[in-house]
Amino acid sequence: MINRHSDKNFQKLMEGNQIKTLVLGEATLMTEFKLSKNAILPRHSHPYEQTGYLISGTIVLHIEEKKYEMKKGDSWCIHKNISHQADVVEDSIVLEIFSPPREDYKKYLDTDSFTL
């Protein structure tokens, strides 16, 4: 699967958080998030390993009991079933990969921008 960059087809996931699933493989799913300043992604955990890269902006990640200020170019890996939260300090763009693929994010696949 090949995805061509496009700023179109983002969907609202929650207040201050837009999502677009870019590609889907057998073992991974890659998403792009547009996060608005002052948005909060509530504390949660899930059965997916989550690897992320901050393309632009600043966020604060709370992973278990630790807090990390993340700036453009920073990356992370959150193991499955680990409690985490994000506070958006300024408008941000995040690329994240989930393994195994998140079933609930498959519906956000941007079929207009990819070829098989």
Image (cartoon, grey):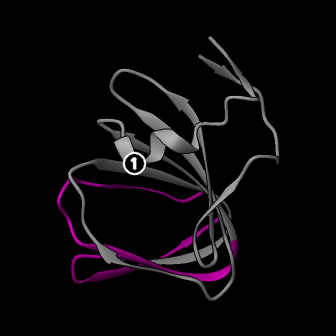
* Amino acid under disc 1: Asp
Residue plotted at (23% across, 54% down): 79
Q: Nearer the viewer, residue 53 or 39?
A: 39
Query: Image point 63% across, 89% down: which residue?
Result: 38
Residue 70 in the magenta stretch? The answer is: yes
Residue 67 in the image, given as x and y percentages of width and height: 36, 82
Instruction: Point out the residue furthest to the top here.
Output: 116
Which residue is situated farthest in the front direction here?
A: 107
Q: Quadrant of residue 111?
A: top right
Specify start and end residues of the magenta stretch as a single range. 63-91
Where residue 88 sits: x, y (%)? 58, 80
In the image as oriented, which residue stretches furthest toward the right? 7
Of 103 and 79, the residue lying toward us: 103
Quadrant of the frame with the N terminus: top right
**What quarter of the picture does the C terminus occupy?**
top right
Q: Which residue is mark 1?
A: 104
Q: Position of residue 62 (x, y in %)?
A: 35, 79
